Image (cartoon, rainbow, N blue to C red):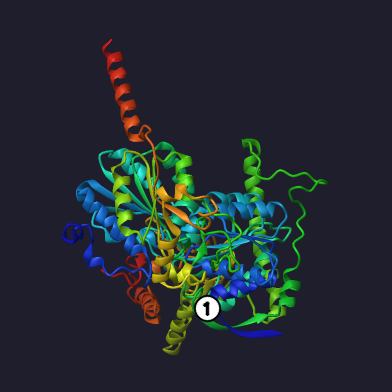
């Protein structure tokens, strides 16, 4: 039985946490993710969950405590944003390479400086190679649904890796939307109890976590970690299928929106996908074959599937909500172009940096991107393939 | 006095963004007046701040200012002071900023006894993010992350500073604003690591949740609970229960870090030159 509610994205995560009732949550306040920890603290104070909340002294400590708890066999999690995620950098790698399936609610926000509390993806994109699974959400419903699925993916025996469930700061974390929740019992049954195979202080099976890796073994450790990450793709699909049977809501590795016959395709991550769908509808109404591919799973990157989905598009806009300072493309642009190359596809790909530091993106801005693609087809002149959208000049 | 200190403010940035009843403006006022008493040269003074409500203060001060990251203001300031020991360096931090996420930098700045003047705006809470408990939130006080009261004991900031090696430690309040001005001035005059804790009210995120009334009520609370140190020393511990000493709490002499380092470099340079001559 679904429950209709009006909730912010942060509330949606907090409710999912309440329903899952994980064991340990260390967290440190940072805008715009702070509310999640506050709400969990309230559930604890109300006796609604028996999670242990640790008001740690920094995000580095939050991730370190989560690693400790998870290694001890407890289901742990934290929430953070921006500089908080950046401060966790060192230990993010430890969590992943120690194969500890911690869940983290990331509320995307720009990195300093200039100091900026608004949305972009520079925080989680900076952590994209830390070995975590990354899933991004378009709206509050997806935030909730993705968080509910998080532990099932992360804790799967073939995966055992930490997972970030990302949402856009303020756009979804603070904006309230109509959505549907599942019953507490349904969530508890779906997620299940955490029963790790190995954990610290198990006298029948002593364990060492985070040991020194000599050159003779380090590469093999990394390779096995990669295999686990690659397994997360199939597991994500299986968990989504099971979730669809429970909720009626379907998820895949990405969402293809009016993409099948599109000549002009946009690849995008996060809340702006909603805006882009409006732009696509508007262009379709004018007879222009626009389409959209919204990333859900970014790590591991489903390159083959994405290239296949884009095979009919001659002109592609890759939308990066971060600057990666390599001088030629953003992280999404790099991934998509790499996937297309591996599939021996050679469409025109224009990479846009948009919405960083909370720069607003309206339907017209997205429409202008499709118009750029149409113009490129007509003039046969791609111009600059790495551009900034809505930059004041 | 007013005209003499106005030049220290970026008046075009005012009014400030702090909430109604917030005491941070009073701390900023005391700091500005201390600059006046010190006759601070704007070209040779640096104000460094961390992250949080307190650290917004650097934006209102017309000096070379550096707004840094959460907890790290002292580390940035240490770099500035070592590079240019002749600069006067003030460091503005909050309670969570200096003793939580930046606690390590705090004890190590004290250990080195580096000549920085640290002003800690203690409002007992992480105010900017909406009232989460900090390491200076009193035991059992309510916060958004502790709706039923905190379970963790707070630091005694002056004791922490003194134990870690700070050579000037004082505590003032926004009620005792003139005293606070003088404490900041004395701290800046002192050669070594100076810590001035400024008890300030956060009626929105702390006071309201802890039934302490509005900004005015919280000022009165400071008046009633802040006991001048001379008097506090004569009182029995039971009489000081729930109260706190204000004034100059600790002052000592110890070698200052940039001095030591300069002497060390000079000595090594002379040795090196002489070795080459020989």
Q: Which residue is mark 1?
A: A259
Q: Nearer the viewer, residue A54 or B116?
A: B116
Q: Residue furthest left?
A: B3
Q: Position of residue A257 (x, y in %)?
A: 53, 79
As drawn, is B74 to the left or to the right of A11? left
Q: Position of residue A172 (x, y in %)?
A: 50, 75
Q: Nearer the viewer, residue B111 or A313?
A: B111
Tell me if residue A348 can be seen: no
As drawn, is A215 to the left or to the right of A242? left
Quadrant assignment for the C terminus of chain A: bottom left
Q: Residue furthest top?
A: B278
Residue at the spot 47% in from the left edge and 40% down from the top edge: B164
As drawn, is A282 to the left or to the right of B256? right
Residue at the spot 32% in from the left edge and 50% down from the top edge: B184
Quick one: SS at disc 1?
loop
Q: Residue furthest right?
A: A204
Q: Residues within 10 Å of mark 1 (few under 14, many from 20)?
A: many
A224 over B112 or under it: above or below: below
Mark 1 chain: A
Residue A218 image-quadrant placement: top right
A248 over A131 or under it: above or below: below
As drawn, is A233 to the left or to the right of B226? right
Quadrant assignment for the N terminus of chain A: bottom right
């Amino acid at each position: 039985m679904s429950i209709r509610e009006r909730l912010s994205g942060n509330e949606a995560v907090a409710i999912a946490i309440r329903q899952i009732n994980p064991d340990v949550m260390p967290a440190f306040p940072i805008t715009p993710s702070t509310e999640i920890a506050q709400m969990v603290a309230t559930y604890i104070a109300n006796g609604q969950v028996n999670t242990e909340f640790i008001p740690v002294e920094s995000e580095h400590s939050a991730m370190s405590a989560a690693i400790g708890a998870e290694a001890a066999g407890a289901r742990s999690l934290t929430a953070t944003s921006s500089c908080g995620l950046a401060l966790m950098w060192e230990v993010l790698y430890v969590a992943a390479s120690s194969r500890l399936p911690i869940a983290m609610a990331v509320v995307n926000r720009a990195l300093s400086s200039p100091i900026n509390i608004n949305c972009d993806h520079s925080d989680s994109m900076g952590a994209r190679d830390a070995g975590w699974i990354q899933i991004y959400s378009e709206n509050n419903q997806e935030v909730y649904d993705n968080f509910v699925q998080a532990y099932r993916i992360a804790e799967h025996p073939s995966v055992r890796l930490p997972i970030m469930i990302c949402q856009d700061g303020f756009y979804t974390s603070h904006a309230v939307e109509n959505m549907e929740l599942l019953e507490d019992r349904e969530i508890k049954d779906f997620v299940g109890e955490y029963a790790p195979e190995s954990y610290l202080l198990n006298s029948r099976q002593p364990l060492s976590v985070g040991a020194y890796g000599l050159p003779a073994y380090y590469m093999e450790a990394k390779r096995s970690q990669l295999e686990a990450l690659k397994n997360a793709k199939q597991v994500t699909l299986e968990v989504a299928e099971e979730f669809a049977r429970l909720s009626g809501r379907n998820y895949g590795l990405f969402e293809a929106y009016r993409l099948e016959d599109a000549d002009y395709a946009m690849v995008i991550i996060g809340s702006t996908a909603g805006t882009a769908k409006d732009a696509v509808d508007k262009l379709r109404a004018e007879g222009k074959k626009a389409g959209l591919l919204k990333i859900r799973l970014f790590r591991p990157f489903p390159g083959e599937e994405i290239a296949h989905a884009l095979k009919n598009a001659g002109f592609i806009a890759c939308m990066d909500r971060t600057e990666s300072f390599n001088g030629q493309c953003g992280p999404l642009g790099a991934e998509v172009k790499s996937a297309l190359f591996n599939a021996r596809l050679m469409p025109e790909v224009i990479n846009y940096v948009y919405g960083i530091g909370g720069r607003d993106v309206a339907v017209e801005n997205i429409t202008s991107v499709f118009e750029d693609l149409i113009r490129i087809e007509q003039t046969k002149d791609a111009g600059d393939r790495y551009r900034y959208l809505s930059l004041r000049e | 006095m007013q005209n003499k200190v106005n030049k220290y403010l970026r008046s075009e940035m005012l009014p400030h963004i702090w909430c109604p009843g917030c005491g941070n403006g009073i701390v900023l006022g005391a700091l500005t007046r201390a600059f006046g008493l010190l006759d601070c040269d704007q070209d040779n003074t640096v104000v460094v701040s961390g992250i949080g409500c307190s650290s917004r203060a650097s934006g209102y001060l017309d000096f070379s200012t550096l707004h840094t990251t959460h907890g790290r203001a002292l580390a940035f300031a240490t770099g500035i002071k070592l590079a240019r020991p002749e600069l006067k360096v003030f460091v503005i931090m909050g309670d969570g900023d200096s003793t939580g996420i930046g606690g390590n930098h705090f004890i190590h700045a004290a250990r080195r006894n580096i000549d920085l003047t640290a002003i800690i705006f203690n409002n007992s809470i992480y105010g900017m993010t909406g009232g989460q408990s900090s390491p200076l939130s009193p035991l059992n006080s309510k916060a958004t992350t502790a709706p039923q009261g905190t379970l963790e004991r707070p630091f005694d900031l002056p004791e922490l500073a003194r134990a870690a090696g700070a050579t000037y430690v004082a505590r003032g309040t926004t009620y005792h604003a003139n005293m606070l001005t003088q404490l900041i001035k004395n701290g800046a005059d002192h050669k070594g690591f100076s810590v001035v804790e400024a008890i300030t009210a956060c009626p929105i995120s702390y006071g309201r949740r802890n039934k302490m009334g509005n900004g005015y009520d919280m000022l009165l609370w400071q008046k009633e609970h802040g006991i001048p140190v001379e008097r506090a020393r004569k009182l029995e511990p039971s009489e000081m229960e729930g109260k706190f000493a204000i004034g100059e709490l600790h002052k000592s002499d110890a070698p200052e870090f940039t001095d030591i380092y300069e002497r060390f470099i000079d000595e090594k340079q002379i040795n090196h030159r002489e070795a080459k001559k020989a």
